[in-house]
């Protein structure tokens, strides 16, 4: 599978999202996806499923070194001591001695970003995290972050119905990968006529078209969550779906303002 990344990152462009799966369902989904060919798994301390993800990785029999594993620190653990403790707890739950990518899950208002990123850099330099990055960071926050550390990734909501042009421009200019979360928009565009027509033409599903649109873009990865094996398989097959320039233009023209994830603690997205 194609990989992207700089600043220590080498990430397969398609991964498996694991929220909100837990326990046995999560372990089965992770092990099944790895058996199918996935080599990128996304989790977070907040998901409460790191133990299940670790169990799935071990059950798959795939060597840890062949898997890209992302986890994230929650926004109330950004103070250096708390961050180190959160990181160690994540490693312990995952049952691994390093992660491939460690992200700040959400920015916190009033956070000391420099101190958090210094702490994450120390983890990276010690070999416990191959790369570090952020999630839900706006352009203004990315500007600030790159002053402190080589940020390898910004994981943000991105799909056919939500544009990220400014974040993507900034990311590309700074060698930062953009990981699209909610990449199939949780089914939001299911009934859209443009998407349906393109899907029909290619003998594909709307979700596969949505993923192909993302994966046709440089420096963009996607982490659809799929518990069902048939959905996991369909998403993997989307890697082979080639959209025409006309398809892409039609998909580009869809409304791009339908944000699905907006927490009470979210930053001002337009900054
Ligand atoms: N950084 C952040 O703040 C943040 C926020 C949200 C999410 N995330 C990450 O991003 C991942 C994905 O986002 P998400 O779960 O919100 O949304 P999503 O991946 O866009 O949507 C997941 C839903 O789509 C279904 N689905 C997946 N592939 C499909 C296919 N080929 N055909 C039909 N249905 C399909 C899944 O069904 P089944 O499960 O039944 O197969 C599930 O109900 C999360 O799991 C998490 O790892 C990160």
Image: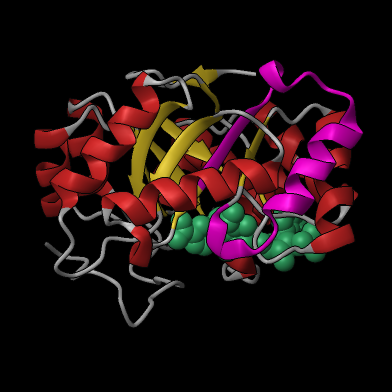
The residue nearer to you, when weighing 112 against 140, is: 112
Q: Residue at x 19, y 27 (%)?
A: 174
Asked if 201 appears above or below 97 in the picture, the reply is below
Q: Residue at x 90, y 36 (%)?
A: 59
Q: Residue at x 34, y 39 (%)?
A: 133
Asked if 7 appears above or below 198 in the picture, the reply is above
List x then y, in percent, for residue 158.
42, 54
User: Which quarter of the rendered picture does the C terminus lie within?
Assistant: bottom left
Asked if 63 appears above or below 192 in the picture, the reply is above
Answer with the quarter of the image where residue 211 lies: top right
The residue nearer to you, when weighing 131 against 37, is: 131
Numbered range of the magenta stretch: 44-71
Q: Is residue 155 magenta?
A: no
Q: Taking 147 as reference, is 66 left or right?
A: right
Asked if 230 appears above or below 97 in the picture, the reply is below
List x then y, in percent, for residue 39.
70, 27
Answer with the quarter of the image where residue 152 lies: top left
Kindly tell me whether residue 99 is visible in this rendering: yes
Residue at the far bottom: name it.
264
User: Which quarter of the rendered picture does the N terminus lie within?
Assistant: top right
Q: What kind of secondary structure does the magenta stretch mostly adopt?
A: helix
Quadrant of the displayed image that contains ligand 1: bottom right
């Amino acid at each position: 599978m194609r990989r992207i990344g700089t600043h220590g990152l080498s990430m397969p462009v398609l991964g498996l999202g694991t929220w909100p799966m837990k326990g046995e369902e999560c372990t089965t989904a992770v092990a099944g996806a790895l058996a199918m060919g996935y080599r990128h798994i996304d989790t977070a301390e907040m998901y409460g499923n790191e133990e299940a993800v670790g169990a799935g990785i071990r059950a798959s029999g795939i060597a840890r070194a062949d898997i890209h594993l992302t986890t994230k620190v929650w926004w109330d653990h950004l103070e250096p001591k708390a961050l180190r403790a959160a990181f160690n707890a994540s490693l312990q739950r995952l049952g691994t001695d390093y992660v491939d990518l460690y992200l700040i899950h959400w920015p916190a208002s009033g956070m000391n970003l420099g101190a958090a990123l210094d702490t994450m850099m120390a983890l990276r330099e010690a070999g416990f995290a191959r790369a570090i990055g952020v999630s839900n960071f706006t352009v203004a926050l990315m500007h600030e972050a790159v002053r402190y550390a080589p940020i390898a990734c910004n994981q943000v909501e991105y799909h056919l119905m939500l544009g990220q042009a400014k974040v993507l421009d900034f990311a590309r200019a700074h060698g930062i990968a953009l990981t699209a979360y909610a990449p199939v928009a949780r089914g939001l565009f299911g009934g859209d006529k443009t998407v349906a027509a393109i899907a029909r033409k290619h003998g594909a599903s709307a979700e596969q078209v949505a993923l192909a649109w993302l994966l046709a873009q440089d420096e963009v990865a996607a982490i659809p969550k799929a518990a069902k094996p048939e959905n996991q398989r369909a998403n993997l097959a989307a890697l082979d779906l080639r959209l025409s320039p006309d398809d892409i233009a039609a998909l580009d023209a869809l409304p791009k303002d339908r944000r699905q994830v907006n927490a009470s603690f979210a930053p001002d997205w337009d900054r």
